[in-house]
Amino acid sequence: MRLGDFEVRTISGGNYWIDGGSMFGVVPRTVWTRYIAVDDKSRILQRTSCVLVRTGRENVLIDTGYGSKLTEKERSNFSSEPGEPLVESLAAAGLTVNDIDVVVLSHLHFDHAGGATRFDAAGRAVPTFPKATYVVQRHEWATANAEYPELRAAYHLPNFVPLKEAGQLRLIDGNVEIVPGLRAWVTGGHTEAHQSIVIESGGEGAIYLGDVCPTFRHLPSLWCIAYDLELLKLRRIKPEVLGTCADRGWWALCDHDPDHAAAKLRRDDKRDFAVVEALATLE
Ligand SMILES: [Zn+2]
């Protein structure tokens, strides 16, 4: 899709299945199951819709899916895709790992940062994109590396420690410009320094929501997921982010929706926001 001078495209980091209740937090099961189907293990289908932005100067990849380093047990729990779904999706778009100049990570949970590294021939985790600068919020980096016992399941060190070791890490503080036309919007909520990414070119705009609103089923401000660390903050920031899309006519880019990677939104009395127009993928 053209967005001003930019080309914006969905790059799949792979589909997976996750417990439906964990994705809808306090929303009663009888309510959320009206919006999404569950399998025989009470799981729902999730995409990892990463976004490639070709600005004309650089190729920027936003998030990397779960990658190829999951254990057998994790693969079975999530019914994740084998191989390297992210690298394969890039190949389908005519790109190799050497073509990515900048990787922006919304946060460092495994389903966003897993594809940032891969195993080399010796079985060591190394950056997947040898020429890229990886952009992470400094506070997210600190949290992920702190090895807090209570966040142990969320952060896997081999997904991101090799980025620093390779000298490819750029830590940023707050709502800074990442490259011209792309800027960070630190939302907090899902993690303390979770960032959405604002993309603007030639009078057009889009926001990569990240896990502020993981699917278009999560449009109501109160519909949070069980992994959100700061519930109240999330409920306040989500309508700001979605409202920006709705009021400006910008595309909302959703990471985990099983059906749609992008939508135009409007404000709605019942569910806070409603989808006006949705695209399965951006091509
Ligand atoms: Zn996620």
Image (tube, helix red, strand yellow):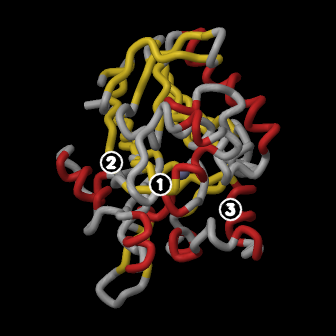
Say which of 112 and 216 sits in front: 216
Q: Is mark 1 within 8 Å of ligand 1?
A: no
Q: Characterize the local packing of mark 1: few (<14), some (14-19) or many (20 or more) Cα atoms within 10 angstroms.
A: few
Residue 61: in sight, yes or no? no
> Where residue 42 is drawn, which disc sits there?
1
| Quadrant in the picture for the C terminus | top left
Query: Which residue is under mark 3?
Result: 141
Say which of 53 and 234 sits in front: 234
Kindly state the secondary structure of the residue where label 3 is placed.
Answer: helix
Q: Looking at the image, is mark 1 or mark 3 nearer the viewer?
A: 1
Q: What distance separates the C-alpha of mark 1 from that of mark 3?
A: 33 Å
Q: Quadrant of residue 157?
A: bottom right
Q: Residue at x 70, y 49 (%)?
A: 228
Query: Which residue is under mark 2?
Result: 12
- Describe residue 161's horizontal placement relative to residue 139 as left or right: left
> Image height check: is 259 above or below 77?
above
Kindly state the secondary structure of the residue where label 1 is placed.
Answer: loop
What x and y, as percent, mark residue 176? 66, 37
